[in-house]
Image (tube, rainbow, N blue to C red):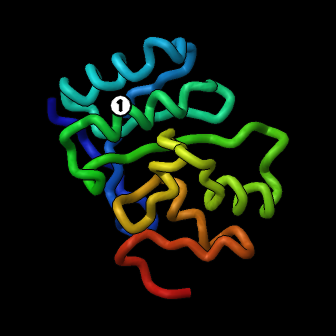
Amino acid sequence: MTVPTLTLNNQTEIPQLGFGVFQVPPAKTADVVSQALQVGYRHIDTAQMYQNEQEVGEALKAADIPREDLWITSKLNNGFHRPDDVTRAQHEVQPGEQGAGAMARDEAGGRDAGAHLGPTVPGVGRRPRGSPAA
């Protein structure tokens, strides 16, 4: 499967087509995401409110795909958009966390679509690889 890409403002490319897991029950999420990865998806879209980030992360960890080849987009719940909430969500990893949130926060091992927004959020200071220092 060949998926066209979109170029972000920082010249990083993201797959235009992502596989969304909205309304996928947690018990089925790891299997469904594994199947999506097998057919060629490299962009997985989830959200905190879907309550299946853990299972998305399990599928990503089990996949034999380099982390730098994957894009994980996630969204915070509407009540958690203040800068301190964003910082906490990006940096807090619960003991044993394997979820998409933890994967997305793994800056050293890959990219997350929200990383290009980091410099616009006071106190976060995140930049994707290759972007100029602020």
At horizontal 43% and vertical 37% (from top left) the residue drawn is 57
Q: Position of residue 68 (x, y in %)?
A: 28, 56
Q: Position of residue 46 (x, y in %)?
A: 53, 33
Q: Quadrant of residue 33?
A: top left
Image quadrant where one finds the N terminus: top left
- In this rendering, the answer to whether 117 lies above or below 29 is below
Q: Quadrant of residue 19?
A: top left
At horizontal 35% and vertical 50% (from top left) the residue drawn is 14
Q: Position of residue 23 (x, y in %)?
A: 56, 14
Q: Nearer the viewer, residue 115 or 99?
A: 99
- Side (left or right) of 116 relative to 15: right
At horizontal 52% and vertical 33% (from top left) the residue drawn is 54
Q: Which residue is mark 1?
A: 59
Residue kind at label 1, given as amino acid type: Ala
- Side (left or right) of 116 relative to 58: right
- In this rendering, the answer to whether 114 lies above or below 79 is below
Determine the residue located farthest toward the bottom in the rendered image.
133
At horizontal 62% and vertical 61% (from top left) the residue drawn is 91
